[in-house]
Image (cartoon, rainbow, N blue to C red):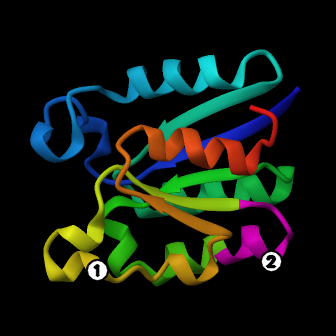
Amino acid sequence: MSRVLVLNGPNLGRLGSREPEVYGTQDLNALRVLLAEQAGSAVEIDVRQSDDEAELIHWLHEAVDAATPVILNPAAFTHYSYALRDAAALVTRAGIPLVEVHISNPHAREEFRHSSVISGVATGVIAGFGFDSYLLALRVVAPGT
Protein backbone atom coordinates (compact mmCIF):
# COMPACT_ATOMS: atom_id res chain seq x y z
CA MET A 1 0.00 0.00 0.00
CA SER A 2 1.26 3.47 -0.80
CA ARG A 3 0.98 6.42 1.56
CA VAL A 4 0.26 10.14 1.21
CA LEU A 5 1.18 12.71 3.86
CA VAL A 6 -1.42 15.46 4.24
CA LEU A 7 0.26 18.23 6.21
CA ASN A 8 -1.59 21.20 7.64
CA GLY A 9 -0.05 24.31 9.13
CA PRO A 10 -0.94 26.76 11.87
CA ASN A 11 -4.49 27.27 13.07
CA LEU A 12 -5.90 24.52 10.84
CA GLY A 13 -6.41 22.43 13.96
CA ARG A 14 -9.27 24.88 14.59
CA LEU A 15 -11.12 24.00 11.40
CA GLY A 16 -14.83 23.74 12.01
CA SER A 17 -14.87 26.65 14.42
CA ARG A 18 -12.35 29.07 12.91
CA GLU A 19 -13.98 31.54 10.52
CA PRO A 20 -16.55 29.08 9.16
CA GLU A 21 -17.57 31.63 6.51
CA VAL A 22 -14.05 31.27 5.06
CA TYR A 23 -13.02 27.72 5.97
CA GLY A 24 -16.35 25.91 6.31
CA THR A 25 -17.74 23.99 9.24
CA GLN A 26 -15.91 20.67 8.86
CA ASP A 27 -12.90 19.78 10.99
CA LEU A 28 -9.68 17.85 10.31
CA ASN A 29 -11.31 14.57 11.23
CA ALA A 30 -13.93 15.14 8.53
CA LEU A 31 -11.08 15.83 6.09
CA ARG A 32 -9.37 12.59 7.16
CA VAL A 33 -12.57 10.60 6.52
CA LEU A 34 -13.20 12.30 3.16
CA LEU A 35 -9.68 11.59 1.91
CA ALA A 36 -9.69 7.99 3.18
CA GLU A 37 -12.99 7.34 1.40
CA GLN A 38 -11.58 8.79 -1.83
CA ALA A 39 -8.33 6.81 -1.53
CA GLY A 40 -9.98 3.51 -0.73
CA SER A 41 -7.76 0.64 0.31
CA ALA A 42 -5.01 1.45 -2.19
CA VAL A 43 -3.56 4.46 -0.36
CA GLU A 44 -2.96 5.17 3.31
CA ILE A 45 -3.87 8.76 4.15
CA ASP A 46 -1.79 10.26 6.96
CA VAL A 47 -3.33 13.61 7.99
CA ARG A 48 -1.26 15.73 10.36
CA GLN A 49 -1.49 19.28 11.69
CA SER A 50 0.98 21.44 13.54
CA ASP A 51 1.27 25.05 14.58
CA ASP A 52 5.03 24.45 14.80
CA GLU A 53 7.12 25.29 11.74
CA ALA A 54 9.94 22.96 12.82
CA GLU A 55 7.59 19.99 13.10
CA LEU A 56 6.26 20.59 9.59
CA ILE A 57 9.84 20.75 8.30
CA HIS A 58 10.68 17.44 10.00
CA TRP A 59 7.61 15.85 8.40
CA LEU A 60 8.76 17.06 4.97
CA HIS A 61 12.18 15.52 5.66
CA GLU A 62 10.36 12.29 6.54
CA ALA A 63 8.56 12.47 3.17
CA VAL A 64 11.89 12.78 1.36
CA ASP A 65 13.43 9.88 3.26
CA ALA A 66 10.44 7.61 2.61
CA ALA A 67 9.67 8.94 -0.92
CA THR A 68 6.14 9.80 0.25
CA PRO A 69 3.96 12.20 -1.79
CA VAL A 70 2.75 15.28 0.09
CA ILE A 71 -0.35 17.43 0.12
CA LEU A 72 0.63 20.59 2.01
CA ASN A 73 -1.58 23.35 3.33
CA PRO A 74 1.07 25.64 4.80
CA ALA A 75 -1.57 28.09 6.09
CA ALA A 76 0.04 31.32 7.33
CA PHE A 77 3.52 29.90 6.68
CA THR A 78 2.64 30.15 2.97
CA HIS A 79 3.56 33.81 2.89
CA TYR A 80 6.88 34.00 4.69
CA SER A 81 8.43 30.69 5.76
CA TYR A 82 11.56 30.25 3.70
CA ALA A 83 12.56 27.38 5.96
CA LEU A 84 9.36 25.52 5.04
CA ARG A 85 9.94 26.43 1.39
CA ASP A 86 13.43 24.92 1.49
CA ALA A 87 12.08 21.70 3.03
CA ALA A 88 9.32 21.54 0.39
CA ALA A 89 11.96 22.00 -2.30
CA LEU A 90 13.80 18.93 -0.95
CA VAL A 91 10.65 16.91 -1.63
CA THR A 92 10.12 18.04 -5.21
CA ARG A 93 13.82 17.98 -6.10
CA ALA A 94 13.79 14.33 -5.04
CA GLY A 95 11.12 13.76 -7.69
CA ILE A 96 8.33 13.34 -5.14
CA PRO A 97 5.08 15.20 -5.84
CA LEU A 98 4.10 17.96 -3.42
CA VAL A 99 0.88 19.86 -4.02
CA GLU A 100 0.22 23.08 -2.15
CA VAL A 101 -3.45 23.40 -1.22
CA HIS A 102 -5.63 26.09 0.28
CA ILE A 103 -9.23 25.79 1.40
CA SER A 104 -10.02 29.38 0.46
CA ASN A 105 -8.76 31.35 -2.52
CA PRO A 106 -5.88 33.45 -1.16
CA HIS A 107 -6.10 35.78 -4.16
CA ALA A 108 -9.65 36.76 -3.22
CA ARG A 109 -8.59 37.71 0.30
CA GLU A 110 -6.28 40.27 1.93
CA GLU A 111 -3.36 41.41 -0.21
CA PHE A 112 -0.72 39.90 2.09
CA ARG A 113 -2.19 36.47 1.28
CA HIS A 114 -1.63 36.89 -2.47
CA SER A 115 1.95 35.67 -2.49
CA SER A 116 3.30 32.24 -1.61
CA VAL A 117 6.93 31.37 -1.03
CA ILE A 118 5.95 27.68 -1.37
CA SER A 119 4.30 27.79 -4.81
CA GLY A 120 7.57 28.18 -6.69
CA VAL A 121 8.85 24.81 -5.49
CA ALA A 122 5.54 22.91 -5.40
CA THR A 123 4.54 20.47 -8.12
CA GLY A 124 1.27 22.41 -8.33
CA VAL A 125 -1.17 24.59 -6.40
CA ILE A 126 -4.89 24.04 -5.85
CA ALA A 127 -6.90 26.68 -3.99
CA GLY A 128 -10.40 27.91 -3.36
CA PHE A 129 -12.41 24.70 -3.49
CA GLY A 130 -12.79 23.98 0.22
CA PHE A 131 -11.96 20.39 1.11
CA ASP A 132 -12.27 19.53 -2.59
CA SER A 133 -8.86 21.21 -2.97
CA TYR A 134 -7.43 18.26 -1.03
CA LEU A 135 -9.39 15.72 -3.10
CA LEU A 136 -8.07 17.24 -6.32
CA ALA A 137 -4.53 17.17 -4.92
CA LEU A 138 -4.96 13.52 -3.97
CA ARG A 139 -5.76 12.73 -7.61
CA VAL A 140 -2.46 14.37 -8.58
CA VAL A 141 -0.18 12.72 -6.00
CA ALA A 142 -1.91 9.31 -6.06
CA PRO A 143 -3.27 8.80 -9.59
CA GLY A 144 -6.18 6.40 -9.73
CA THR A 145 -7.75 7.60 -6.48
Residue ID at (25%, 75%): 113
Q: Is disc 2 surrounded by few (<14), some (14 to 19) or many (20+) residues within 10 Å?
A: few
Q: Which mark is residue 145?
A: none
Answer with the quarter of the image where residue 65 lies: bottom right
Quadrant occupied by the C terminus: top right
Residue ID at (77%, 42%): 142
Asked if the stretch drawn in magenta spans residue 17, the answer is no
Q: Is residue 45 above or below residue 109?
A: above
Q: Is disc 1 surrounded by few (<14), some (14 to 19) or many (20+) residues within 10 Å?
A: few
Q: CA distance from mark 1 to mark 2?
A: 25 Å
Residue 143: x %, y % from top left: 80, 42
Residue 59: x %, y % from top left: 62, 53
Q: Is residue 119 above or below residue 5?
A: below
The earlier-in-sequence mark between 1 and 2 is 2
Residue 96: x %, y % from top left: 81, 62
Asked if the stretch drawn in magenta spans residue 91, the answer is yes
What range is drawn magenta here? Answer: 89-97
Q: Nearer the viewer, residue 129 or 67?
A: 129
Q: Nearer the viewer, residue 114 or 13?
A: 114
Q: Is residue 39 left or right of residue 64?
A: left
Q: Which mark is residue 93?
A: 2
Residue ID at (29%, 54%): 104
The residue pinned by badge 1 equals 114
Mark 2, secondary structure of its residue: helix
Nearest to the eye among marks 1 and 2: give it: 1
Q: Nearer the viewer, residue 41 or 57?
A: 41
Q: Is residue 12 left or right of residue 22?
A: right
Mark 1, secondary structure of its residue: helix
Identified by mark 2, the residue type is: Arg
Identified by mark 1, the residue type is: His
